[in-house]
Image (tube, rainbow, N blue to C red):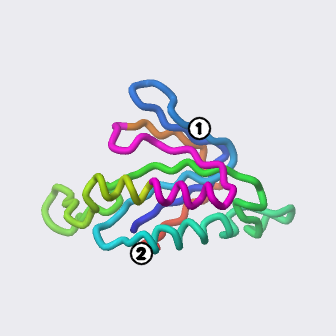
């Protein structure tokens, strides 16, 4: 699993010019699922994410979690994160999980967050999306083998 997490003051997803999902303060999660990822891996990441202290306290230190600031999460599946760029000029997606399995894992991730009381919005799996965000900070974290 490869994941890019961005702290945002706002983010949205559009498909064919129509807004499909939007959040205010929270996290934009770009989620790349690999063949070797298990349900346990996805659930473990979903359990940790709301507790990670990515938000600033009154002193400007990253001391507050998503749960503490009552933030939302916008989940966007992004298989291009798992691309192998080491050979040739075209990316290889050989490590990406096949679409139906990856879609189930993305749903599992979103539902695991929801079960923890997090407001979750989602992109449209497999669609060509426009993702708009205002990165707060900027603050961006990259997780591999999350």
What crowding class fits label 1: few (fewer than 14 Cα within 10 Å), some (14-19), or many (20 or more)?
many
Percent from the top left, x then y, of residue 88? Answer: 13, 62
Residue 90 sits in quarter: bottom left
Q: Quadrant of the N terminus?
A: bottom left
**Element assignment for label 2:** loop
Seen in the image, is 29 located left or right of residue 72? left
Residue lying furthest top in this view? 17
Q: Which residues are magenta?
A: 107-128
Residue 18 at least partly seen: yes
Q: Is residue 122 above or below residue 66?
A: above
Name the residue that disc number 1 marks.
22
At 69% from the left and 56% from the top, the residue drawn is 117
Q: Per the image, is 117 magenta?
A: yes
Q: Position of residue 109 (x, y in %)?
A: 50, 60
| Badge 2 density bin: few <14, some 14–19, many ≥20, Cα 10 Å | few
52 left or right of 78 in image: right
- Counting labels gives 2
Picture coordinates of residue 54 (x, y %)?
A: 67, 64
Residue 41 image point, x, y percent: 45, 73
Q: Which structural element holds mark 1?
A: strand
Q: Residue furthest left?
A: 88
User: Disc 2 designates what residue?
Assistant: 145
Query: Cα distance, mark 1 to mark 2?
Result: 27 Å
Residue at x 70%, y 52% (from the top left corner): 71
Lateral position of residue 143 relative to residue 97, left or right: right
Residue 111 colored in magenta in the image: yes
Height in image: 114 above or below 22?
A: below
Cβ atoms at labels 1 and 2 below 8 Å apart:
no
């Amino acid at each position: 699993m490869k994941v890019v997490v961005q702290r945002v003051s706002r983010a949205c997803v559009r498909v064919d010019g129509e807004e499909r999902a939007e959040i205010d303060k929270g996290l934009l999660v770009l989620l790349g699922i690999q063949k070797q990822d298990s349900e346990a891996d996805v659930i473990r990441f979903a359990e940790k994410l709301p507790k990670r202290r990515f938000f600033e306290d009154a002193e400007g230190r990253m001391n507050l979690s998503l749960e503490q600031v009552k933030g939302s999460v916008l989940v966007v599946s992004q298989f291009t994160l798992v691309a192998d760029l080491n050979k040739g000029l075209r990316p290889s997606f050989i490590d990406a999980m096949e679409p139906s399995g990856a879609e189930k894992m993305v749903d599992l991730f979103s539902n695991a967050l929801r079960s923890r009381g997090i407001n979750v919005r989602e992109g449209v799996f497999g669609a060509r999306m426009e993702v708009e965000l205002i990165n707060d900070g900027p603050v961006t974290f990259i997780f591999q083998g999350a």
